[in-house]
Image: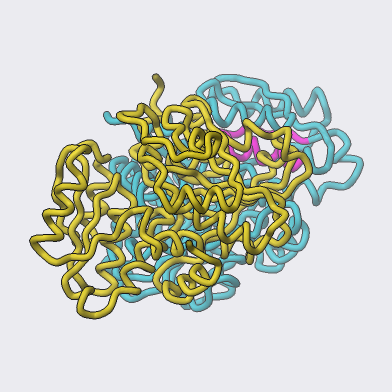
Chain colours: A cyan, B yellow
C-alpha cells in the first residue's frame, strides 16, 4: 500500500521535471459556496495535467537496463502525453496504445513529445499493449494501478497542503483512481481531521458504488460523459487506498460538469477539462457541508477540444 | 503628461483593490520564438482585465463630494465593468453608457457589479454620457484619456518589471491607448534601453498610421475585428505619450489574432480575449527581432464569448 513516505520520495524524484503549480482563488466562487476554496492548478502542469507527476516518477524510478528498452502504456490521453513527456526527459523510447476515439488534441500532444502511437479499439487496448511489450521489452506503466504512478500523483496534494495551511477538506476527481488514491494518502496521513472527497460523473459511478458496497464494482461499459479522463473503472490498489482513508465519493450530473467548465473559462479565465471540472460540480452539490470551511480542490487537467462550450 | 511618479502614486492608491497578477511562461512559446517571453496575466485581474487598475485609481482619487455624485462612462465593455467595480468599492453610484453591440458577457459583468446601464448606438455614446452627467452630476471617467486612468493602467507594467528583471522589450495592445501609454511611461522611464512595442489589429490601424505620420489619425469607423477592446481610436494624450517614448506599433491580421487566442487556451490553459492575444500575434510577426531577448507581454484581459473558437 502506498504511504506518505512513497509520496515524499516521489516529490524528490520528480522535482525540476514538473511544475510546482499555483493555487488560485476566486472571490466569486467563495461567495457562491460560502467557503474558502483553493484551486490547485494542475491544468497548468507540464503536459496540461497532473499525470506528468506519476509518469515522471515511474520513468525516473526505472533502472537503466529497463529504461533503455522503453516504456509503454494504454491511455485515454493525458497519461499518454505524460509518459511520452517523461520518456523524453530520460531520452528513452515510448509506445502509446490509444483508443481510436481519443480527442485529436490529446493525440497531437503525444506525438509532439515524440512517442510512437498504436491506435486500436477501446476493448483491445490491453492486448495490443501486451503485444508491444513482448515485441520491444518495454516496461508497462499502467495509468493508475502502478504504485510509482499513484505516489507521483499524490505529490499534487502534498504541494497543495504546503501552499495552503489548515484545509478542512480536499477534493479530487476519481476515474481509475491514481490521483484520488495519492491525494487520500497525503490528506489521510498529514491532515487526519480533514474530509477527503472524490468527484465522479454519475454516468460512470463505479467508484461511488464500490465505496458504498465495500466491494469493487466492474467498470461501466461505454459510458457517455464529458469527463473523458474518468471513463475507466476504479483500480484495485486505488480502491483499497480509498477505503483505507475513508474517501467520500460525490457523483455529478453532466450538466453540472459543463456548467463548471463554463464557470472556469468565463469567471476564472482558466481552461479546466471536464474531468477536472467535476470537482467544482461536486462542491456545488455538497455546498451545505462546506460553509465556513477551507477546501482544496485539485483541478486535474486542462486538455480539451472545447466541444462542451458549443451551444447544444 | 503622465510621469512615472503618477504611476507610482497610482500603485499605492489601488493596492489591495486589484490583484498583483502572476507572470507566466511557456516553454513551447519560448521555443517557437527563440526568446524568453514573460506574460503578465491581466486576464486574471479583477473584472478580468487591466481596466480595474485605471478605474480604481480614478475613483479613489476623487474628493468625497464628487465621489458622492457618482461616476459615469461610455465603454466597449471592460472599462465599464472596471468602473462599476471601482464604484462598488467606494459605494458610490455608477452609470454606464454602452453600445447595443457590447458582448453579452460584458453586459452581465457590469450589471453584476451593480452599475446602472444605459444602452445606445455606438455613435451616440458621448451625447448620452453628457446627458447623464448633466442629470446626475456624476464625474465622467473617460476610458483612456483620463490621466488617472492612464496612470492606473501603467501599474501593470510597473509590477511586471518588478517581477521580471532585465527585460529587453515590452509589448502591450493599443486601442484608445491607456494601457499602452501607461506601459510606455514605465518602460521608457525605468528601462530606457528596452524596446516598447504596441500590438494593433490591421483592421483598425489608426495608431500605426498616427505614429508613422506623426499626426494623430481619425479613428477607423465600423472596423471588423475580433479585438473588440481595440476598436476605438487612439486618444490625444495617449498619442503624445506614445511619441515621447518612441513606441513601435506592430499591426496584426485577424487570423493571427484567432491563432493566438487558440494558442493560449490550448497550450497555456489561459483564456485571453482577442484584444489581449494581439500581443502574441505581434511577437510572432516580429520574431526575427526578438531572438535571444527577454520580452514582457501584457495579456490585457480574458473577457470573451469564445465566438472565435467556433469553426468558421
Magenta-highlighted residues = A71-87
Nearest the eye: A218 or B172: B172
Residue A232 seen from this side = no
Image quadrant where residue B285 sits: top right
Q: Position of residue A155 (x, y in %)?
A: 64, 60
Quarter of the image holding residue B29?
top right
Looking at the figure, which quarter contains the N terminus of chain A? bottom right
Toward which corner of the image does residue A64 lie, by quadrant? top right
Position of A307 with respect to A98 (left or right) is left
Q: Residue at x 39, y 30 (%)?
A: B225
User: In this picture, is A85 found above or below B56?
Assistant: above
**Residue most extreme to the left:** B135
Q: Is residue A138 left or right of residue B221?
A: right
Most distant residue in the right direction: A65
Q: Quadrant of the C terminus of chain A?
A: top left
In the picture, measured across the screen, residue A141 lies left or right of residue A249, that is right
The residue drawn where x is 51% and y is 66% is B20
Is residue B80 in view from this perspective? yes
Residue at image coords 23%, 49%: B108
Q: Where A207 falls versus A15 (above or below)?
A: above
User: In the image shown, does B48 or A105 lie closer to the viewer?
Assistant: B48
Q: Does A134 lie within the magenta span? A: no
Q: How far from the left and from the top, in percent, is residue B81?
A: 29, 55
The residue positioned 61% from the left and 66% from the top of the image is: A158
Q: Which is more toward the observer, A293 or B274? A: B274
Residue A260 position in % (x across, y down): 35, 48
> Residue A57 in the image: x percent, y percent?
73, 52
Please count the marks in the image.
0
Q: Nearer the viewer, residue B93 or B245?
A: B245
Amino acid at each position: 500500500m502506498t504511504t506518505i513516505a512513497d509520496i515524499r520520495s516521489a516529490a524528490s524524484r520528480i522535482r525540476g521535471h514538473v511544475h510546482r503549480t499555483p493555487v488560485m482563488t476566486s472571490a466569486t466562487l467563495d461567495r457562491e459556496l460560502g467557503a474558502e476554496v483553493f484551486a490547485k492548478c494542475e491544468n497548468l502542469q507540464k503536459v496540461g495535467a497532473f499525470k506528468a507527476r506519476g509518469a515522471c516518477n515511474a520513468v525516473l524510478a526505472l533502472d537503466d537496463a529497463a529504461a533503455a528498452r522503453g516504456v509503454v502504456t494504454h491511455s485515454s490521453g493525458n497519461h499518454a502525453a505524460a509518459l511520452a513527456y517523461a520518456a523524453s526527459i530520460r531520452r528513452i523510447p515510448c509506445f502509446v496504445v490509444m483508443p481510436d476515439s481519443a480527442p485529436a488534441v490529446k493525440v497531437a500532444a503525444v506525438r509532439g513529445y515524440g512517442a510512437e502511437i498504436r491506435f486500436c479499439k477501446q476493448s483491445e487496448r490491453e492486448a495490443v499493449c501486451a503485444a508491444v511489450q513482448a515485441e520491444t521489452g518495454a516496461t508497462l506503466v499502467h495509468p493508475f494501478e502502478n504504485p510509482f504512478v499513484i505516489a507521483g500523483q499524490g505529490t499534487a496534494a502534498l504541494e497543495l497542503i504546503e501552499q495552503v495551511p489548515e484545509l478542512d477538506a480536499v477534493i479530487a476527481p476519481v476515474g481509475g483512481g491514481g490521483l484520488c488514491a495519492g491525494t487520500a494518502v497525503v490528506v489521510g496521513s498529514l491532515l487526519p481531521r480533514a474530509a477527503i472527497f472524490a468527484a465522479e460523473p454519475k454516468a460512470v459511478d463505479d467508484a461511488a458504488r464500490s465505496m458504498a458496497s465495500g466491494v469493487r464494482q466492474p467498470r461501466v461499459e461505454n459510458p457517455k460523459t464529458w469527463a473523458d479522463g474518468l471513463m475507466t473503472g476504479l483500480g484495485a490498489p486505488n480502491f483499497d487506498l480509498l477505503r483505507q482513508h475513508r474517501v467520500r465519493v460525490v457523483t455529478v450530473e453532466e450538466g453540472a460538469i459543463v456548467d463548471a467548465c463554463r464557470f472556469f473559462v468565463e469567471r476564472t479565465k482558466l481552461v479546466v477539462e471536464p474531468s477536472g471540472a467535476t470537482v467544482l460540480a461536486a462542491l456545488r452539490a455538497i455546498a451545505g457541508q462546506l460553509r465556513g470551511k477551507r477546501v482544496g480542490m485539485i483541478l486535474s487537467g486542462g486538455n480539451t477540444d472545447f466541444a462542451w462550450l458549443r451551444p447544444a
